[in-house]
Image: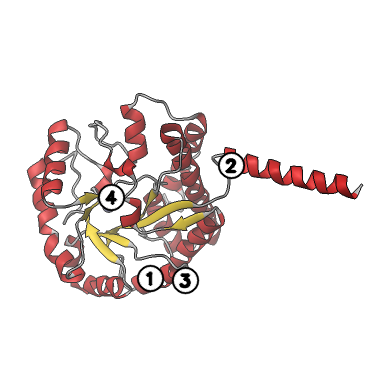
Amino acid sequence: MNVCFKLLTFITILLTCAISLASPNAKHNIKVALTIDDLPLKENITTKVVNVLKKHHLPPTWGMLNAKKVQNNPKLLKELKIWIASENKLGNHTFSHLDLAKVSSSEFIEDINKNEPVLKKFMGNQNYKIMRYPYLSYGNTKHKYKEVQKYLKQNDYQTAFVTMDFFDSEWSPAFKRCKIANNKTSINWLENSYLNQANNAIVIARELSHQLFNRDIKYILLLHLKNISPNLLDKLLHQYENHGVQFITLESALKDLVYKLNPHIYRKRAYTLLNRIRLSRGLNNPNIVKKLYASLPENKLKNICRRD
Ligand SMILES: [Zn+2]
């Protein structure tokens, strides 16, 4: 009886191991580099954000700078000081957040350059040459795409392509409206749907990664923290840790060979690098990915807490 029971337990353990190895949804180490776009953050928020990052022991985190915001409001220099003093980094997101689908490659390159003095001022001797294209817009023509990539290569820039994204900025105007209206029920709904979509982003990225490469790549997650409370960031990081995410540096993520791939996709928007690669191979989204994209509550986000 006892031997039988032990044997059963052993078989159960073996089966559990086999299942968790086979399933792409199994809870294990998913390596993710967190990046935050559109720095500086709003006034008086950076201290709270860096404290949340510290609480979760995140490695130095890259924030992608638009120095025009500082030119318009010099008080924001303080936010950048706090960001850097906490050993985080700043990369290039163009001076004025240009959309390469709407401007010429030379205008875009000029705007990359224009961002550099503030990057140099804060990064000092450290490397700041990591580029994040605004709107993940890489150029709607082959010419633009090539011209900008050529410039970046010649100037030792690496591109921080995004491979995990849940369109978090869709929540920003909704949070702003509901906070002004002090509508707690709606804020609660927004927080839950935000966290839910954040989890879906892991599933989507992993499904695509397994579809295209049969493995988990090192993911690069994009967040904006506009109107998102530091408390919600705290919840998001907890949730990701519980999901098996281990946060790594952007530099380490960029060593994954996937970021050397150059899919020839020229269009207004191409979203994540995984989507660009999928499109370049002529593949459809896996069904679960289609389902999760369709579950994005776009209409409710547009209308929630509107007075009219
Ligand atoms: Zn941006």
The residue labelled by disc 2 is 21
Comes first in the chain, label 3 or label 2: 2
The residue labelled by disc 1 is 50
The residue labelled by disc 4 is 160
Q: Nearer the viewer, mark 1 or mark 4?
A: 4
Badge 3 element: helix
Q: Residues within 10 Å of mark 3 (few under 14, many from 20)?
A: few
Q: Separation of disc 4 and disc 2 at Cα? A: 30 Å
Badge 4 element: loop
> Total marks drawn?
4
The residue labelled by disc 3 is 55
Q: Is residue 178 above or below residue 294?
A: below
Q: Separation of disc 3 and disc 1 at Cα? A: 9 Å
Residue name at image x 24 percent, y 32 percent: 267
Q: Nearer the viewer, mark 1 or mark 2?
A: 2
Residue name at image x 14 percent, y 37 percent: 146
Q: Amino acid at mark 3?
A: Lys
